Image (tube, rainbow, N blue to C red):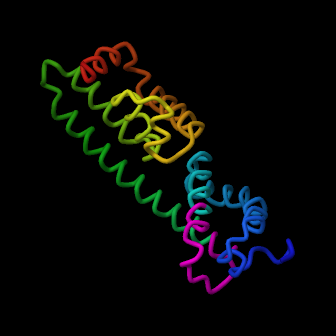
Amino acid sequence: MTEAKGLTTEALKGGQIKAFEMFFRQHYNHLCNYANSFVKDRDEAEEIVQNSFSSLWEKRESLNITGSVRSYIFSMVHNQCLNFLKHEKVKRKHASEMMNVTLEANEDPDLQANELELRIFKALQSLPEKCGMVFKLSRFEELKYAEIAEKMNISVKTVENQMGKALKLMREQLRDYLPFILIVLSAWNG
């Protein structure tokens, strides 16, 4: 197989790891840029591309690829981007509904605490799935990074990256409530 030809279906199904690695290196950055043009989040784009390559490799023997492997991986990435965008739309709708509940609760004397809990819940719900799971396992189940990595079948480095991303996103969404967060979180964990 030559580099110009790309990865053949036969090489993929035959488990030729070197050919797959070369294919990965050739197309990874371009696929990340392609995914990012949809999702507008570089980390999510990279995760989508990594998941697509992983799925391609894991399911290589059962796949029915009629065109080129390159076209197939681009279709996989495209479809995962669309699924991500649909999921984000559902999350935004849910967040909007939760905000409506907050507005209805304005007469409650414990409004500030209720609003904070709602904001924390909303912030947790807005985290990407893997990111949210890592955060919950770390903060609410008090698992160590190595335990989370084992439980989720990911690397400790991925856990660290996802946790950093979760904390950054939570800080951004809750910056107006930082003085009150410790009180509520201690109540949730107590």
Q: Residue at x 27, y 31 (%)?
A: 118
Q: Is residue 23 left or right of residue 157?
A: right
Image coords of residue 21 (percent x, y): 75, 62
Q: Residue at x 73, y 70 (%)?
A: 16
Q: Is residue 141 above or below residue 25?
A: above
Image coords of residue 74 (percent x, y): 63, 69
Image coords of residue 144 (percent x, y): 46, 29
Which residues make up the magenta segment?
54-73
Q: Residue at x 13, y 18 (%)?
A: 109
Count of all numbered marks drawn on residues in the image: 0
Magenta run includes residue 55: yes
Q: Is residue 180 above or below residue 121?
A: above
| 38 vs 182, nearest the viewer | 182
Instruction: Give the quadrant of residue 49.
Output: bottom right
Instruction: Give the quadrant of residue 188.
Output: top left
- From the image, which quarter does the N terminus lie in? bottom right
Q: Is residue 20 left or right of residue 145?
A: right
- From the image, which quarter does the C terminus lie in? top left
Q: Residue at x 70, y 81 (%)?
A: 10
Magenta run includes residue 170: no
